[in-house]
Image (spheres, rainbow, N blue to C red):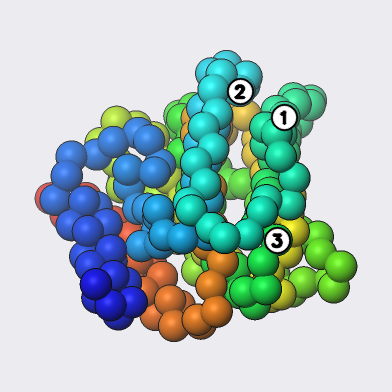
Amino acid sequence: MTAFTFKWFGALLFLGGLLGAPGVAQADNINPPPYVGAPCSTHGEFLLTDGNVTSSVNVFGSCAFPLAFEGPTTATDTSGSDSWLFDVIWPNFVDPLPIKYLRIQLTFIDNGTPGGSFNLGVTATDPITPTVDLVADSGLCFTCTQDGTAYAYRDYVIRPNPDFEEFILTYNPQDLVLSQFVVDTVSTPEPGMLAVLGFGLAAIGLARRRRAAP
């Protein structure tokens, strides 16, 4: 299968799942990126119950290069008086590939307060300070699922490919409660995947309109 066919086949798969399947709570079933399972890709899921990280799964795609560090990915969830903070340190392959694509998917339980918001910060560490560009932001969608959850995802492009990243999510637990935090990344020499990622953002907008239609 050529790279072009792989990209568009993956895009059609997640678009079909988004528009044709019933609403699901798990973020990675809503809009996975087309590079899931590709060489030098990573995937991880963090499930939370009552603010506690109950399980996490890290799956690393086959890659000729070693990981920046071995051992479990760290994830902490701490509560404060006005906000909760979820902090993840995410490893990467130490490779010469110049670009890293990153997708973070979030599922929240809606506490019944209209609206709600969150802040998500992404920093990258490398001997050369990388640039982190936000290239797609779905915003919070309260109509993309059928089970009362709120969903959002963001796509980033990081140059050069860093050794590891830190993700810091803050939110007001009186409005939203984090249910699942999903990370997907891939190291690549090609910038051509940006068009496919934008296609996914358009799919979220279409799903919102379909859910809102009487």
Numbered mark located on residue 100 in the image: none
Return the residue nearer the eye: 117 or 29.
29
Mark positioned earlier in the residue sequence (1 or 2) = 2
Q: Position of residue 32 (x, y in %)?
A: 37, 53
Asked if the residue under mark 2 is in contact with the one under mark 1, i.e. CB atoms within 8 Å, the reply is yes
Residue 167 seen = no
At label 2, the amino acid type is Val
Asked if the residue under mark 3 is in contact with the one under mark 2, i.e. CB atoms within 8 Å, the reply is no
- Residue found at x 46% / y 32%: 110
Residue 50 to residue 183: above or below = above
SS for callout 1:
strand
Numbered mark located on residue 94 in the image: 3
Q: Which residue is mark 2?
A: 53
Cα gap from disc 1 to disc 2, whole angstroms: 7 Å
Q: Which residue is mark 1?
A: 76
Return the residue nearer the eye: 190 or 101.
190
